Amino acid sequence: MLWSKYNHLFQSERHGWLLYNALSNTFLELPPQLGGKFSKLHAGESFQCDDPGIVLQLIAAKAVVEPGEDQRLRDILRMKRRLADLSERMLLLTVAPTRNCNFACPYCFESNRAGVSMSRETEEQLVQFAERFQPGQIFGVTWFGGEPLLRFEQIRRLSERFRALDFKRYHASLITNGYLLDAEKSAQLEELGIQDVQITLDGPEQIHDKRRMLISGEGTFRRILENMDTLFASSWSGVLHLRVNVDRSNADEYHSVHRLLYERYASFAKRLRVYPGIVHAMGKENPDTSCLFNAEDAADFQIEQFRRYHIRNMSFYPGRKLFNCIAARRNGYVVGPEGELYKCWNDIGITERIVGYVDPKKTWNTALLAEWLEGASALNDPECMDCSLMPICDGGCPALRREGAPHCSRYRNRLRELLEAHYDASVSGKN
């Protein structure tokens, strides 16, 4: 038996020997007398265990492997990921019917890009573009912006056309600032196939209203909460994802808005997901990086929220990622309001980052498309493929990879603390 390169063994002061294997995504507590012996296997020494049950656990967890088994299993996982990225079974479109917005958030990456909305001609071309992928099995649409609800009638028309196409499954999501999500619109979400809605807050009212204000400068917090009340009171049966933007300037208030939301919507807790949206720099659009989080800050923040405030859903435990960001997916595109296609949400409105068009008469930038699908792929990066966390990491944000910016997972340098926090939460019943 050999030590797996994907093992992470450490001794916790509170829980003794803990073993995590990234290849199997398995987390084990080892008996006190066994942990020290097992650690010697890492140094190349022999390992003996008289308990066949524990041996079987270690084998099942891929913590002990046969010669060459690590590489074979890694290559199988790599193949599965590559097939998933290049699959023709899914068409995933993030559609921005407008770049206009009713908010004036100071950190918005689209704030300096001219507003434009989708024409009827482009609308028709978009439907025809989707038709060319039939009979695909899955069609996923995310409504994005600007603020997509400024074009709600267009969303309604396109949704009806999309749902009539010959796909086996259709799923739609809406990313909105929530200010325009009134009772009339909430009542229509179900029939439009929109089962997930994401709304963003930046903290409690006094903080949110300084960061997410209307163009006129007025606050938006109370109106958004009133609209969420209406949404849950409507016939809509979907899930509300409440993203709370977090950086160094407002991280201390995350717990208060988290508590406020779960208390306010206690009867809808199964349909509410409150989570921190870590704000980090994307390219050179945002010149003020002094308050932005890096991977270390994100890990510190997560651990503190559990240890200090006992917040349960902080995702300490790494999850295996088979499906990548749509930027790395063959049939994943961001559709701009003029019918232009991008691979990254942050590229909307930047001409040189257009990879293609819904208009069949226009020429695609196949070199740029190949750069996204091949050049920015972690599966083609020897350093990533040799990393002991490769099986549970997708290589980080493809856009950051393309720019040569830091992109490694927060798990890489803080795995021990995050795993220990997960174990604490598990044994205490807080997660």
Image: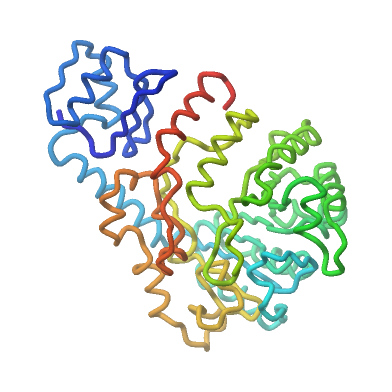
- Res 35 quadrant in image: top left
Residue 82 placed where, x, y %? 34, 57
In depth, the one of 284 and 54 nearer the eye is 284
Tell me if residue 135 comes above or below residue 229 in the rendering: below
| Image-based side of 333 in relation to 220, left or right | left
Tell me if residue 355 comes above or below residue 84 in the rendering: below
Residue 195 visible here = no
Residue drawn 26% across the image and 16% down it: 34
Type of colouring: rainbow
Residue drawn 65% across the image and 45% down it: 251
In depth, the one of 105 and 58 nearer the eye is 105
From the image, which quarter does the N terminus lie in?
top left
Residue 230 placed where, x, y %? 86, 46
How many discs appear? 0
From the image, which quarter does the C terminus lie in?
top right
| Image-based side of 35 in relation to 338, left or right | left
Residue drawn 50% across the image and 69% down it: 343
| Image-based side of 207 in relation to 108, left or right | right
| Image-based side of 140 in relation to 8, left or right | right
Residue sitting at the far front: 290
Residue 222 placed where, x, y %? 87, 50
Residue drawn 57% across the image and 41% down it: 301
Residue 320 placed where, x, y %? 41, 42
Residue 313 visible here = yes
